[in-house]
Image: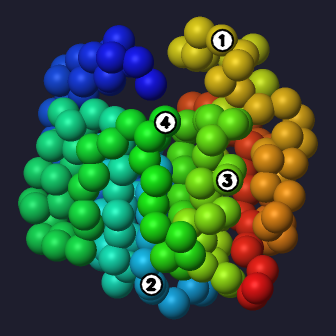
């Protein structure tokens, strides 16, 4: 990610305040409902809603984002709700490398890097670990409320599972939600 991208994200988060409540993504809530808490990694965590919610469910979470400003807001929200098991990591995902086979859960929401993230995620997951991924589908570009500048940041129909051929699809959906159009994947790493 370039310095310009970092500045853009910091500027975006500087205009925000600490969220009033923790609001996890419903796709995540659905996918981990029956899983035993363990070690989780959230990539591009933004304001930390998912990381904090997972922590409240007993998970220990490493939450990574490029923006120190966004992470500062996330940490303030975590402190407000007395959440102590999230490690906030300011890092560029072009350079971040997690430890191999460390995480029972890796999650990504509203971020797409077709080249680097799939390999990084597969290596980070423990055998039996789960990936929960949701990001914009190509249908987002046709929405009246679309904010994306380029279709490069969206997935073609059926593309998301193809980015993770090493994983077994547990659940997949492409759906138009009230505020966005997305592809959603839950996929499990084999036992080795």
Q: Which of marks 3 and 4 is nearer the N terminus?
A: 4
Which residue is at a point 61% across and 58% down the rendered structure image? Answer: 121
Which percent across, then down, holds residue 137? Answer: 74, 32
Helix or strand or loop: what does disc 1 sit on?
loop
CA distance separating discs 1 and 2: 36 Å
User: In terms of depth relative to the viewer, which is nearer, 163 or 159?
Assistant: 163
* Residues under numbered marks 3 and 1 in contact, where contact means CB atoms less than 8 Å apart: no
Q: Name the residue under label 3.
A: 119
Which percent across, then down, holds residue 164? Answer: 79, 55
Q: In the image, is residue 76 above or below residue 66?
A: below
CA distance separating discs 4 and 1: 19 Å
* Residues under numbered marks 1 and 2 in contact, where contact means CB atoms less than 8 Å apart: no
Q: Mark 2 points at which residue?
A: 38
CA distance separating discs 2 and 3: 21 Å
Q: Earlier in the sequence, mark 3 or mark 1?
A: 3
Q: Name the residue under label 1.
A: 150
Q: Mark 4 points at which residue?
A: 94
Which residue is at a point 24% across and 24% down the rendered structure image? Answer: 10
Q: In which quarter of the image is residue 12?
A: top left
Q: Horizontally, is 17 left or right of 114 in the view?
A: left
Q: In the image, is residue 65 above or below residue 140?
A: below
Q: In the image, is residue 14 above or below residue 77?
A: above
């Amino acid at each position: 990610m370039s310095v310009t991208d970092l500045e853009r994200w910091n500027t975006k988060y500087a205009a925000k305040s600490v969220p009033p409540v923790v609001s996890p993504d419903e796709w995540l809530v659905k996918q981990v409902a029956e899983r035993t808490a363990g070690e989780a990694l959230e990539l591009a965590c933004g304001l930390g809603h998912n990381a904090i919610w997972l922590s409240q469910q007993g998970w220990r979470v490493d939450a990574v984002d490029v923006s120190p400003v966004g992470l500062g807001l996330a940490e303030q929200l975590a402190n407000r709700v007395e959440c102590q098991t999230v490690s906030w990591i300011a890092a560029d995902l072009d350079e971040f490398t997690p430890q191999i086979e460390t995480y029972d859960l890796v999650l990504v929401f509203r971020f797409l890097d077709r080249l680097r993230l799939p390999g990084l995620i597969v290596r980070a997951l423990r055998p039996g670990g789960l990936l929960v991924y949701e990001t914009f589908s190509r249908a987002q570009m046709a929405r009246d409320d679309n904010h994306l500048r380029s279709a490069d940041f969206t997935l073609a129909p059926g593309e998301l599972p193809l980015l993770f051929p090493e994983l077994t699809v547990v659940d997949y959906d492409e759906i138009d939600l009230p505020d966005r159009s997305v592809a959603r994947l839950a996929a499990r790493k084999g036992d080795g």
